[in-house]
Amino acid sequence: MTAVLGATMAVGVAAAGAGWFIWQTGRSRLSAASLLLAGALLLLGVAAVLLDLEGGVPVLFRLAGCLFLPVAFLTYPRHDWRDPFSGVLAAVVVTAGLSGAVWETAFAVAGYVVVGALLLHVWWAFERGEVEERRALTWSALAWSGAALFAAFLAFWGESLERGTATGLSAVCLACFVAGPVAMVVGAVRPDVVDVRGLVTRAVVTATVFTTLVAVAAAVSSAIGELSGKPLAATPAIVLCALLAFGVRPLQVLLRGVVDQLLFGDRPDPLAAATSLVDRIGDDPTLALDALREALVLPFASLRAGGAVLASSGSEVTHTRVLPLRLGDDEVGEVVVGLRAGDLRLSSADEHVLRIVAPLLAQTLRARALSRELQQSREAVVAAVEEERLRLRRDLHDGLGPTLSGVAFATDAARNQLRGNPDLAEELLVRLRADTAGAIAEIRRLVEGLRPPALDELGLLGAIQQHAVTLHSASGTPLTVTMAVPPALPTLSAATEVATYRIVVEALTNVAKHAGATRASVSLDTRDGVLVVAVRDDGTSSESWSPGVGITSMRVRSDQVGGTLRADAGPAGGLVEATIPLPAG
């Protein structure tokens, strides 16, 4: 008796606490109030029993169990009073609950009516409810159904159990009803903490296996008892239990497939899914994800790299699984897949399929990255060309254009003064000569801006040496420049040659102006398909260089040909190193 009272008190506390929590969320206020009243009635009934005030105790317990708890379930997560069918169900539950609470003789009939009405409510709510409402109702229905099944099992076997065992199981049965209010809190506050549909599948399979095996055991033992005229002995009972135990796992696997298909549809064949994926995954990540979702029947899939979503397919779901994508030792990204309805995790077969296609998805990511880099490189080339055209246009319009216009006007003026004022005409011609020389110098400057003439006249090495002999350190002494070049330096493209020359000239100029150095060295080398250009000096700088116009210009030159640049200085001297990719072959 004490165990039953303790279990009843636990149910009352759970119901009252759940009602308070749900009330705080602002949702399902009627359900929360019903839970509070049910919990209060149960606690009052326990207190009355402890105080030996047993006159109205059965009514309190029946009101809580037959009226307020069903009303709490009926109005959870919400109840549409404007719906005629819902209104009829509510009227049936309230009428039957009151009848069973007031008249003890009608308690059993009222219980069956209430249970039937609540089952209809669950079906109707699932048909008309939103996704969040369905999840909350699933949590509640799963917990209450489990407690009700245990109570039915106890009622079926209660008469054949000893008194102490029956009392203990009754207490356990009441304790099971604690799960109902707790599940209602979870459904109202955190319905997506776990995919409850997976719990439903497991609960249905477990209950079916348990009921089937118990029924088989009862049928076999009864048949043997009828045939032999005496109860089944201990040894045959043990053998029977052992034989039934061998059927637990196969029955679970069989029922899991059947229940899964009935509730959530077909599942893919892993081998067929892997084959179709290998044939359909290409360079487009979105099409690859579409193929992945279709083959594995997944609700959602996405590719991520560096925390950014590169492509996605389907609608996002709460529960996902993340698998890294690797190429060799490098992790290039990850694939995120949403779990199917009813799954708590990916099956081993699905994970095996994903691991088979992971290298293909990694190649897709790499192809996308290379495509993006190629696009950026093209944009950089176009931007550089347009910037060079803009510079030429500006120089021609603002420099050479006015100079040539002045030459034309001076020519007309000299011609007009040639007969009437020869001295003025001569002065105009002298000025015209100077303007023409300035125009020629401007043209030469523009041509040198496009490509230094020294490169055509002396070659890359000669042009660098020619510039080096003109440099002086900050103290006025000539800057000593040495060069290290491999004997078989390959022929460089025009763009690579100009970029190398500009980088070296700018680096040597920076050394002469800012490094406080007396010596510098220039080295050119080729390794692994790239040209490595390094300019070192013996300047003593305690701080690293800060990016300025010179370093920015060198970096732009390097970027234009797809290379990289590193520039730094310290107590041991300065270093500018550029790597420029060379064309294949």
Image (tube, rainbow, N blue to C red):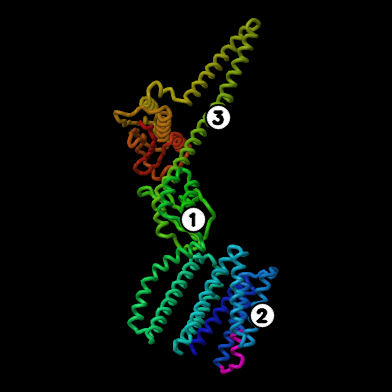
User: How crowded is the residue under tag 2: few (<14 C-alpha within 10 Å), some, or many (20+)?
Assistant: some
Does the magenta-highlighted stretch encompass residue 393? Answer: no
Q: Residues within 10 Å of mark 1 (few under 14, many from 20)?
A: many
Q: Residue at x 58, y 93 (%)?
A: 54
Label 1 SS: loop
The numbered mark at residue 298 is: 1
User: Foreground mark, 2 or 1?
Assistant: 2
Residue at image mark 3: 390
Q: Which residue is mark 2?
A: 95
Quarter of the image containing the C terminus? top left
Residue placed most toward the observer, 203 or 211? 211
Q: Amino acid at mark 2?
A: Thr
Position of 575 relative to 202 (above/below) = above
Disc 3: CA contacts within 10 A as few (<14), some (14-19) or many (>=20)? few
Residue 82: give x, y in percent of width and height: 70, 68
- Tell how many labels: 3
Q: Secondary structure at mark 2?
A: helix
- Whether residues under marks 3 and 2 lie with C-beta atoms below 8 angstroms apart, the answer is no
Q: In terms of depth relative to the viewer, which is nearer, 326 or 447?
A: 326
Q: CA distance from mark 2 to mark 1?
A: 46 Å
Amino acid carrying mark 1 in the image:
Leu
In this view, the mark in front (3 or 1): 1
For residue 494, side relative to residue 20 (left or right): left
Q: Is residue 392 above or below residue 196?
A: above
Instruction: Classify 271 as above or below 388.
Output: below
Please, what is the three-letter code of the amino acid marked with disc 3?
Answer: Leu
Residue at image position (36%, 35%) is 530
